[in-house]
Amino acid sequence: MPDSAVKHPEACQTMFDVRAGVDALDTELVALLARRFGYMRAAARIKPSRDAVRDEARKASVIAAAVTEAEAHGIPADVIADIWERLVEGSIAYEFAEWDSIRD
């Protein structure tokens, strides 16, 4: 976390500490998601056909990788699977919209 006033979770002593950490992390997560969606724009630009946007094998692989990472970090894999399902489906929808807008 870039803000030196933000404490690591183990060092938090108050709810103010916890909330400051969550808020700072949420800001970072949104920035990372913006970068991820940038890759979706690139994919829309690169893929030769609209049919290539949805790739179920790739979707399954991405979700499985996130679940594996969740397990390695000791966080609920089922929750991460649900989040990544929504993230990937949202990314696919965004990529379809981008693909269509580039070719209009």
Image (cartoon, rainbow, N blue to C red):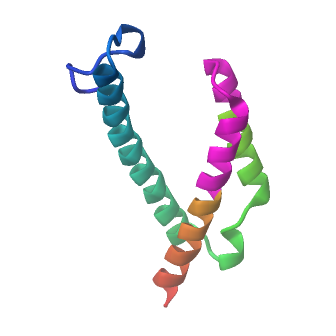
Classify residue 44 as left or right of residue 23.
Answer: right
- Report x, y in % for residue 17: 30, 20
Write the residue at 43% across / 58% down.
Answer: 38
- Report x, y in % for residue 16: 28, 24
Within the image, what quadrant is residue 69 found in?
top right
Within the image, what quadrant is residue 24 found in?
top left
Within the image, what quadrant is residue 77 found in?
top right
Q: How many marks?
A: 0
Residue 69 in magenta? yes
- Report x, y in % for residue 29: 41, 41
Range covered by the magenta-colored residues = 68-88
Q: The N terminus appears in which quarter of the rendering?
A: top left
Q: Residue furthest front?
A: 15
Classify residue 90 as left or right of residue 27.
Answer: right
Front position in the image: 43 or 94? 94
Task: Give above or below for 24 relative to 51.
Answer: above
Write the residue at 62% across / 64% down.
Answer: 92
Q: Main secondary structure of the magenta part?
A: helix
- Report x, y in % for residue 83: 62, 45
Front position in the image: 80 or 66? 80
Task: Give above or below for 24 relative to 47.
Answer: above
Front position in the image: 45 or 17? 17
Write the residue at 67% across / 28% down.
Answer: 76
Q: Residue furthest bottom?
A: 104
Write the residue at 70% across / 41% down.
Answer: 81
Task: Give above or below for 77 relative to 45.
Answer: above
